[in-house]
Structure formats: structure tokens, C-alpha cells
Amino acid sequence: MAGTVANKCLSPLGFLTRRLSAPEFITQCCYHKKVVDHYENPRNVGSLDKHSKNVGTGLVGAPACGDVMKLQIEVDEQGKIVNARFKTFGCGSAIASSSLVTEWVKGKSVDEALMIRNTDIAKELSLPPVKLHCSMLAEDAIKAALADYRLKQQDDQQEAARANI
């Protein structure tokens, strides 16, 4: 398999003119340029205040590969996602998937963000089949963050109802 990838990615003259280190070889041959871009220049890395009522936090993991993804979204009073942050421990495809979804969810309503599918993420990043679990993890992180946000909103409504009684 690696030999096939190497043959497709590098011309025979490439080995004569320049040697690639293992990380360079992998990024040059195995990952799409969008994955490399999001990996080398991740967007929206960091955290938001998880105790804030308008911030939803999703923490998901994939035990099979060890990837862990935390996605946080901040929603304004009109129900639009105004900010998103992530922290991911995992491979380049997991980091790229996290970075991409933070860009995609901004400006969307909560319902629109729920429409983002792992297939859309995988297609945008040109993920190979062996890395599809990264896009699935990103979709799960969106759902978990939005579920946490909605739970906080329900709690606030219940507290307000109790205060009015």
C-alpha cells in the first residue's frame, strides 16, 4: 500500500533530487492539501467558558484510535452560533476535521449546525476511508455541544418558571 502511494505521489526523479523525512513524506503523499492546511494552521483552537449558559461543550472520543475532541459553541440570543473553539488530541485528520467544523458552524443557527454531516466533512477534506472516523467524531462533537447548549437552555427556562411560581 505504501509503495503504491509513493508511486502515485512522487516521481522517480523526486527521490534523486530531494529526500523527504517521514513526516514530510506522509504530508506530501497521504493527506489532501486541505487537511495539511488545517493541521498546520488550525482555526479556532482554544476554549470558551463552559459554565456560561450560552456555551455548549461537546467532548467525544474514539477508543479504537485514541482521538479525543472537545468542541465548544457560543450561541447568541437569536440562536445563531457566534463563536466556536476546539481542542483535539489525535491525528492530523482529527485536528483538521475539528478546525473545519468550527469554521462551518459559525453564523449558522443551532438547527442548521445539526445538519452538518460527517460525509460533508470527509468530502471537503478528501479523507480516505481509513480516516472517516475523524469526520464522524467531528459530527458527534457538534451534536454533543448542541445538546449541552440545549440542556442549559432548558435548565434556565425551568429556573425561570420556578421563580415565577
Image (cartoon, rainbow, N blue to C red):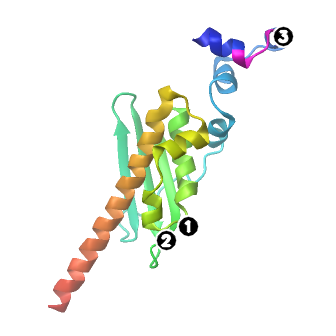
Residue 21 seen by the camera: yes
Q: Which residue is mark 3?
A: 13
**Most prominent secondary structure in the magenta stretch?**
helix
Quick check: is 41 in the magenta stretch?
Answer: no
User: In the picture, which quadrant includes the C terminus?
Assistant: bottom left
Q: CA distance from mark 2 to mark 3?
A: 52 Å
User: What residue is drawn where x is 63% and y is 9%?
Assistant: 3
Q: How many marks?
A: 3
In percent of width and height, residue 7 lies at 70, 12
Q: CA distance from mark 1 to mark 2?
A: 6 Å
User: What residue is drawn where x is 40% and y is 28%?
Assistant: 65
Q: Which residue is mark 1?
A: 107
Label disc, if present, on residue 80 of the rendered structure: 2
In percent of width and height, residue 156 lies at 27, 76
Q: Is residue 113 above or below residue 10?
A: below
Label 2 near label 1: C-beta < 8 Å? yes
Q: Which mark is first along the chain, 3 or 1?
A: 3
Q: Which mark is first along the chain, 3 or 2?
A: 3
Label disc, if present, on residue 15 of the rendered structure: none
Q: Nearer the viewer, residue 106 or 17?
A: 106
